[in-house]
Image: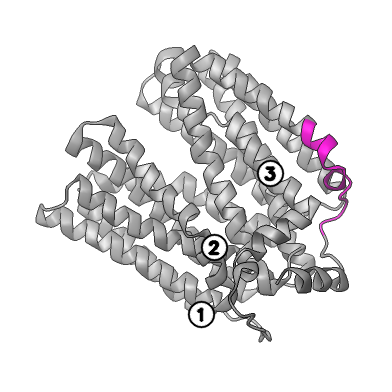
């Protein structure tokens, strides 16, 4: 936090994510009031998920060919314009389901360009030895927003959705101004001519690096199988026999655990056995899903979800550190775009998996299958990716090794 540019970045990311969470609460409540159709809530998630996958190649190219600060700042303005449209449409009475979904698609497209650019900025903001701690601190910004954003959005919604959207507009603009103040050292960029190899270099680079491929795919399948977020309303009402307050408590629990773990890793970076710690975190994630599945008390459920969130945060910090420290800066945007595509799809597909199995077998079997599946993935990946298991310290690869690989792929 003594690095001024990183502090500006951290504040911008916290504000941006908090505003996004505030907007999500208002949109969900408003569109359900407009249509009274649960399917429309699923469409809200779908239109925000689609740009991450559809534009991943273009996003990576943009992050590597242009100033990442400009992309991040413009993305904040884009989200601010979308929030302003929601505010004006609500105040003017012309906002309907289709117009809301169209505006959310534009907002999600801006966010899809923002996230890889923001992640790829971090290595340029702090010295290399501080990078794992900086990544943990960046993760804490996300979790702070997850805890505070929805609560603040719910409180402001009492004054009307227009107030929420107007506030989000102001916050997005403030985040853009903060990003504009970030300073990084000059870097010489050689722009490769566009071609199929250049466009898909991020995929090729990850595929050629067993450590990166193992870390990203481990996170994808563990969250796909072990995610329980979609089951929380069922547990709160039908298993724990509590009201909406319990749902809010359960939804905040993973973020509480993740924030606690992120703060700890910000102050005390992982100094050894990083690969084994990552596998242990994924196993703990699966075990916490099992504990949640079998819980019949709010206190035990809350504790299980805190552990669930903390384990996931540890895995995320190690994975992000490996990706950012083992990828050349000039192609980090393309690699982070691929990483964002996989991590973005794992949560959405995981919720779909949990909901589908719950509709077929029930919520408890769905959570149990997910927990067992996450542990099974951890065991299979330990055997399939021994290089990942043997990773010790989170340090950059040798420049010679990275340069050779980059020349072959770019």
Foreground tag (2 vs 1): 2
In the drawing, does residue 233 fall left or right of residue 40?
A: right
Per the picture, the main secondary structure of the magenta-coloured stretch is: helix
Q: Earlier in the sequence, mark 2 or mark 1?
A: 2
Alpha carbons under labels 2 and 1: distance apart: 28 Å
Q: Secondary structure at mark 3?
A: helix
- Residue that numbered label 3 is attached to: 217
- Residue that numbered label 2 is attached to: 57
Q: Earlier in the sequence, mark 3 or mark 1?
A: 1
Residue 395 percent location from the top left of the image = 83, 62
- Type of colouring: one colour
Residue 388 percent location from the top left of the image = 83, 47
Residue 48 percent location from the top left of the image = 40, 50
Foreground tag (3 vs 1): 3
In the drawing, does residue 229 fall left or right of residue 125?
A: left
Q: Secondary structure at mark 2?
A: helix
- Residue that numbered label 1 is attached to: 181
Residue at 19 percent across and 36 percent down: it is: 35
Q: Secondary structure at mark 1?
A: loop
Is residue 267 shown to the viewer in this render? no
Residue at 60 percent across and 63 percent down: it is: 119
Considering every residue shown, the one lying at the far front of the view is 196
Question: With respect to residue 321, does 67 lie above or below?
Answer: below
Is residue 342 shown to the viewer in this render? yes
Tell me where the magenta segment starts and ends, as one range: 380-394
Q: Earlier in the sequence, mark 2 or mark 3?
A: 2
């Amino acid at each position: 936090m003594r690095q001024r540019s990183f502090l500006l970045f951290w504040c911008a990311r916290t504000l941006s994510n908090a505003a996004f969470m505030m907007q999500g609460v208002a949109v969900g409540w408003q569109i359900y009031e407009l249509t009274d159709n649960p399917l429309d809530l699923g469409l809200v998630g779908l239109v925000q998920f689609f740009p991450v996958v559809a534009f991943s190649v273009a996003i990576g190219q943009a992050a590597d060919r242009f100033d990442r600060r400009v992309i991040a700042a413009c993305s904040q303005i884009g989200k601010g314009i979308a929030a302003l449209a929601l505010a004006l449409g609500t105040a003017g009475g012309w906002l309907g389901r289709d117009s809301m979904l169209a505006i959310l698609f534009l907002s999600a497209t801006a966010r899809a360009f923002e996230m890889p650019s923001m992640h790829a900025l971090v290595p340029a903001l702090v010295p290399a030895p501080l990078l794992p701690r900086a990544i943990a601190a960046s993760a804490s910004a996300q979790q702070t927003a997850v805890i505070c954003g929805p609560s603040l959005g719910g409180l402001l919604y009492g004054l009307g959705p227009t107030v929420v959207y107007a506030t989000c507009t102001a916050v997005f603009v403030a985040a853009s101004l903060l990003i504009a103040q970030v300073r990084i050292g000059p870097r010489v960029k050689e722009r490769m001519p566009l071609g199929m190899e250049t466009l898909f270099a991020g995929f090729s680079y990850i595929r050629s690096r067993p450590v990166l491929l193992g870390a990203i795919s481990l996170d994808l399948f563990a969250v796909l199988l072990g995610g329980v977020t979609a089951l929380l309303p069922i547990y709160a009402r039908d298993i724990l026999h509590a009201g909406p307050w319990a749902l809010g408590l359960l939804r905040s629990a993973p973020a509480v655990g993740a924030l606690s773990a992120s703060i700890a890793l910000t102050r005390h970076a992982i100094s050894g056995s990083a690969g084994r710690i990552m596998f242990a975190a994924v196993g703990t994630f699966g075990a916490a899903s099992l504990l949640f599945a079998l819980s019949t008390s709010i206190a035990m459920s809350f504790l299980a979800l805190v552990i669930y969130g903390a384990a996931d945060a540890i895995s995320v910090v190690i994975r992000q550190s490996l990706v950012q420290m083992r990828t050349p800066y000039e192609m980090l945007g393309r690699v982070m775009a691929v990483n964002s595509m996989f991590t973005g799809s794992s949560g959405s597909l995981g919720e779909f998996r949990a909901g589908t199995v719950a509709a077929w077998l029930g919520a408890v079997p769905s959570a149990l299958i997910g927990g067992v599946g996450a542990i099974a993935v951890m065991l299979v990946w330990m055997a399939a990716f021994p290089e990942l298991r043997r990773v010790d310290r989170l340090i950059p690869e040798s420049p010679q090794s990275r340069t050779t690989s980059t020349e072959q792929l770019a």
